[in-house]
Image (cartoon, rainbow, N blue to C red):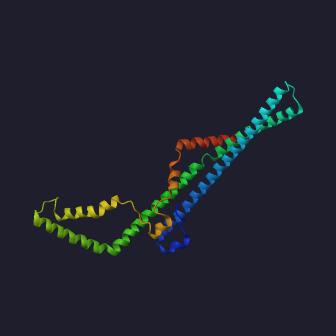
Amino acid sequence: MNNPVENNNLSTFPAVTQRALETLNTTRNAWLEARRQQKAAADNIATIRQRRAEMEATTNALNEEWRTLFRESQGVVSKEMKKLRTEIALGRETLEDFDELLTAQECENALLPQETAELAGKYIHAHDELVGIRAKQTWEDFIQSHGKALIQTLSLLKSTMGREASAVVGVVHSVNDPDTLLKDFIHKHITRPALNNTAMPEQDPVFKLAGVAPDYSARLDLSKQLSPAAIHKMKVRQEQAEKVKSV
């Protein structure tokens, strides 16, 4: 996961970047907290299932022991067997309680993945906003420092390439006229490399704080977002469960 944004590092950035970083930090923390709650809920259910499995194994073992004693005694029920029978009945009743508890917990936690997905989406959106802001700032800084020299160099290349082409084969419009040659040059040396490039400016101070991309786990969480129909169905089930509990 990316490192959380440290507030004491924000003062060196433009105000709009500071706000974007603060929003990113807030949304990321909210998403991580939702993730923590979702995991805690899942761990709790897993623990309950394990306890139920242990109770079921114990109850089955007691029941098998009772059947063995029953066969050996030819149907005579001793005090020990009566005690076993009571423990078996209590075990089966407890298993039913476990099932009710699991159903209630699963219903209560059903929308946690959806809440996590929604918060992951907000965090990803905040990161995308930050990247957009920083990209424009980087471009503006570059143009301010090197824009004049860049334009002058391209203009020089335009006149040079146009003159060289006309001296060899003559000028053909849209083939080797100066404008076309310059466009081809820009496409070859700037546009195409930019389109094919996947590397991001990881050493940029903003991206060193926020990462060049959102945490991958956030995209995984977002991919689990439910449809509106599924959300509605879960909410109806929760409401029905609440009504049953209140009766």
Say if residue 209 shows up in the picture. Answer: yes
23 with respect to 236 (left or right): left
Identity of the residue drawn at 38% across and 59% down: 198
As displayed, is residue 61 above or below residue 47? above
Between 67 and 114, the one nearer to me in the picture = 67
Identity of the residue drawn at 57% across and 42% down: 232
Identity of the residue drawn at 75% across and 35% down: 60
Name the image quarter holding the C terminus: top right
Single out the residue that lies furthest toward the top. Answer: 74
Identity of the residue drawn at 44% across and 63% down: 131
158 with respect to 226 (left or right): left
Single out the residue that lies furthest toward the right. Answer: 79
Q: How many numbered discs, if any?
A: 0
Residue 37 position, x and y percent, is: 63, 54
Between 55 and 69, the one nearer to me in the picture = 69
Residue 15 position, x and y percent, is: 48, 71
Say if residue 245 shows up in the picture. Answer: no
As displayed, is residue 242 above or below residue 189? above
148 with respect to 243 (left or right): left
* Quarter assignment of residue 34: bottom right
* Quarter assignment of residue 179: bottom left
Residue 41 position, x and y percent, is: 65, 50
As displayed, is residue 22 above or below residue 53? below
Residue 5 position, x and y percent, is: 53, 67
Single out the residue that lies furthest toward the front. Answer: 72
